[in-house]
Amino acid sequence: MLEAEFDRFAEEYDRQHTDNIKLSGERPEFFHRYKIEDVVAVCRRIGLAPRRILDFGAGVGNSLAYLRQGFPDSEIVLLDPSARSLDIARSRFPGEADFRTFDGHNIPFETGYFDLVFTACVFHHIPPNEHVPLLGEIRRVMSSGGSFFIFEHNPYNPLTVHAVNTCPFDENAVLIGARTLRKRLATAGFQNAGTTYRIFFPRTLSELRPLEKFLAKLPLGAQYYVHVTKRD
């Protein structure tokens, strides 16, 4: 994993992200918030009340406030290969989580520890040949019946592709299609993963966003998530 790359951009992440998503009309907080709102909604629907949550590739902690709001009684771990990013997250949210540095291979927790694993736009920064081993390691630390949510950019959305191609901290990114990601999850031992596409309308058309629930299977949204439950 690219520790040096993210250490280099840690200080400027929010500014660069804000500049890069201007076409959407939204600020970064919109994207951080909607992801966790989706996770919370699915967990409520399936009856999952996670005791322990892993934010894999947590960076500077942009999802933490929303995770804490959605799951106030859960233990939350932020894991990232960038020590500088975690230092920033720790200073922003002192005492709100357990901040752990990741060596890129081994998640430093026992088998079956987490009931919920969340990762947001992380795997396109990881070399493709490392995906299956990392997905397998994530599966190892998940409890039986636990949920895994992977949010990614949709490579079939032209505005998303433009945003990634013009973003400094995405200079080494390789976007992943949902079908490819589901295949890699299956190779790592996960079964019956489902895909939901998100963010079809910019802010100027936000009155149309309630229609997104009818478009969730249409592979044109700016982002998507794959949700899978661990079954032993």
Image (tube, rainbow, N blue to C red):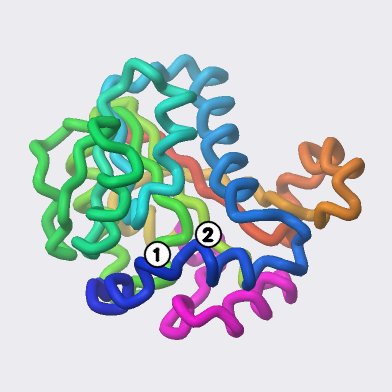
Left/right of residue 61 with respect to residue 181 in the rendered view: left
Please tell me which residue is depicted at 52% across the width and 27% down the height of the picture: 40
What residue does disc 2 label?
A: 152
Nearest the eye: 82 or 159: 82
**Whole-Å distance between the Cαs marked 1 and 2?**
8 Å
What numbered label is drawn on residue 75? none
Do labels 1 and 2 touch, CB within 8 Å?
A: yes
- Which quarter of the rendering shows the N terminus? bottom left
Nearest the eye: 218 or 98: 98
Magenta-drawn segment = 156-182
**Residue 92 against residue 95 in the figure, above or below:** below
**Residue 156 against residue 219 in the figure, above or below:** below
Visible residue check, residue 85: yes
- The spot of residue 19 in percent (x, y) is 63, 71
Q: Earlier in the sequence, mark 1 or mark 2?
A: 1
Visible residue check, residue 232: no
Please tell me which residue is depicted at 75% across the width and 62% down the height of the picture: 24
Instruction: Check disc 1 and report its element: helix, strand or loop.
Output: helix
What residue does disc 1 label?
A: 123
Going by the numbered disc 2, the residue's amino acid type is Glu
